[in-house]
Image (cartoon, grey):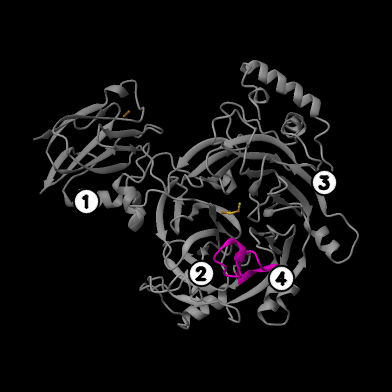
Amino acid sequence: MSKEELGLDKNANDVALESEERRKFFSKSALIGAGVVAAPMTAAMFASTAQAQVKSAANSPVVHPGELDEYYGFWSGGHSGEVRIMGIPSMRELMRIPVFNIDSATGWGLTNESKHIKGESAHILAGDSHHPHMSMTDGSYNGKYVFINDKANSRVARIRCDIMKCDKMLTVPNVQAVHGLRVQKAPYTKYVVCNGEFEIPMNNDGKDGMEDVSTYRSLYNVINAETMEMAFQVMVDGNLDNTDADYDGKYFASTCYNSEMGMNLGEMITSERDHVVIFSLAACEAALKAGKFKTYNGNDVPVLDGRKGSELTRYIPVPKSPHGLNTSPNGEYFVANGKLSPTVSIISIKKLDDLFANKIKPRDTIVAEPELGLGPLHTAFDNKGNAYTTLFLDSQIAKWNVQDAIDAHNGKKVNYIRQKLDVHYQPGHNHTSQGETRDADGKWLIALCKFSKDRFLPVGPLKPENDQLIDISGDEMKLVHDGPAFAEPHDCMMVHRSKMKPLKIWPRNDPFFAPTHAQAKKDGVDVYTQNKVIRDGKKVRVYMTSIAPTYGMNEFKVKLGDEVTVIVTNLDQVEDVTHGFCMTNHGVQMEVGPQATSSITFIANKPGVQWYYCNWFCHALHMEMRGRMLVEA
Ligand code: RUQ
Ligand code: CUA
């Protein structure tokens, strides 16, 4: 686009007025009828329908100042490594939860409490979060935990929803790149399940060369949701991509896009068909109990053999490099999204018992394979039997009716496509409000678009993505909001606020800082009443309280080269009065919430006076909330 086309030679008002005109001009031409393939349109035409759609939407996305949203949205922060909490429908960002990244505001990755939670991977400062999913009871969100994977470093983390902080992190052994992640939906989330995406030598000890790939495998990973330890792994044929669970606690399903086990693009996309692997939980647990497993790479995680021919799994051939795997909220179907095929494959969950009993063939479980458009990646559902599939290449959402698709498959003359809506642009995941649970309510749909192109003011070569909010409560989908988002909300989910019970202030005995309290006890310090410096060889522990606008300690002395740990306990009992602790010139910063204890360790390597200060605004005298450390040379 030229400078003129972008409007960069005009002032902001001119641009706004002009685009108003363009919207009016194009407002009719951009409407697309159900099932009709769109003629190529200009960017301005794409943008044009938005205002009209907001006006005629049944659900209002407007949340007035002071009003609360109806849903909590949990958004993956992609390669930022974090998780974000959004208010839906306002699309306001309410909070960021640092998980696989480091964060200087809260001290995540810097404090001792967060390093303790990150455990063996605390030295890894980056991550790539993809799939946030909440724990469930009987197929409904229970407000307890959100789980998320780190594809980059093969980790899974858990967020505690009462404090909205990560409280557990696990590096999954024997695999590389943990991708699709979901939870067991019923009877409760006993297990978190996730896919090992990149195939690697089973004993990856450097002895297997690059040439011989016959020992390369991918594993399905089953994690105990409460302890966040590995329960078991299942070796499969092919790699694994996305996964989901049924509503009976019996089966999990995963897509495989590289059944060829190719090592480069050409090899990976040669087959016309790949497959969906179905895992029988009962069969896996029985094999585990019977000791039918092996271990690899010197760890003791049981690895079951679920390759073709095994009793633990079934392989259902589907076209071609399937990606998303989504369970319909009525519990009847797994839907595998075709990606390189314009179709989705609908697998009847009811038929899986017969498949495992070898009464039917794998393809007999497919009840329809409707053609939807180019690049189907993920499917979401409402409560009226409709499905919504992202079409990456077409930049559209296809709304289609599941029963009609099945009827059409059986020869009935019926158009299962209800509508195609342009989104902007190239959508990956989509999600409906509570649509991955029994409580799908058919109100909102989010399209997470990988490109925003011309939808926002240009901000340089790196552009935001575009999270679009779509009202699906009426017969027609209506696009009502564009939401710029930073790299990269892969996936999200929306939970009704009635399911959530976040705390207002920290409980004093919270396990989050229990290890710090245990150390204080060893040092004979009551963190709620005492301010004290404990010297332990070259290690110094400085315990101080904070109450707006002062620290319990105005000054302390250490020696050059000491390893100093500052432990701050916030005595304020007032909601929202968070203090911070920042030691100037040491990269030391952290949040200390009301009634919480936080600690951070650094080397005192600069002689002289160093001021420390409160970096979270807490009081009219917040600027004065500071003290001095003297580092004696
Ligand atoms: S994947 S764009 Cu990481 Cu969820 Cu489908
Ligand atoms: Cu305490 Cu600012």
Q: Nearer the viewer, mark 1 or mark 2?
A: 2
What is the three-letter code of the residue carrying label 1? Answer: Gln
* Quarter of the C terminus within the rendering: top left
Q: Along the horizontal axis of the image, is 310 left or right of 479?
A: left
Is residue 410 in the magenta section? no
Q: Residues within 10 Å of mark 4 (few under 14, many from 20)?
A: few
Above or below residue 81? Residue 363 is below
**Is the residue marked 3 within 8 Å of ligand 1, measured from its CB?**
no
- The disc, 1 or 4, on the residue closer to the chain's N-terminal end is 4
- The location of residue 312, given as percent across then percent down, is 57, 77
Q: Looking at the image, which residue sits at the far right? A: 413
The residue segment tinted magenta is 250-278
Question: Can you see residue 245?
Answer: no
Q: Which mark is residue 241?
A: none
Q: Which residue is mark 2?
A: 219
Q: Which mark is residue 519?
A: 1
Q: Which residue is mark 4?
A: 350
Q: Nearer the viewer, mark 2 or mark 3?
A: 3
Above or below residue 561? Residue 548 is above
Q: What residue sits 37% from the left and 48% below the top?
A: 125
- The disc, 1 or 2, on the residue closer to the chain's N-terminal end is 2
Q: Which mark is residue 37?
A: 3
- The disc, 2 or 3, on the residue closer to the chain's N-terminal end is 3
- The location of residue 334, given as percent across then percent down, is 68, 63
Ligand 2, image quadrant it occupies: top left
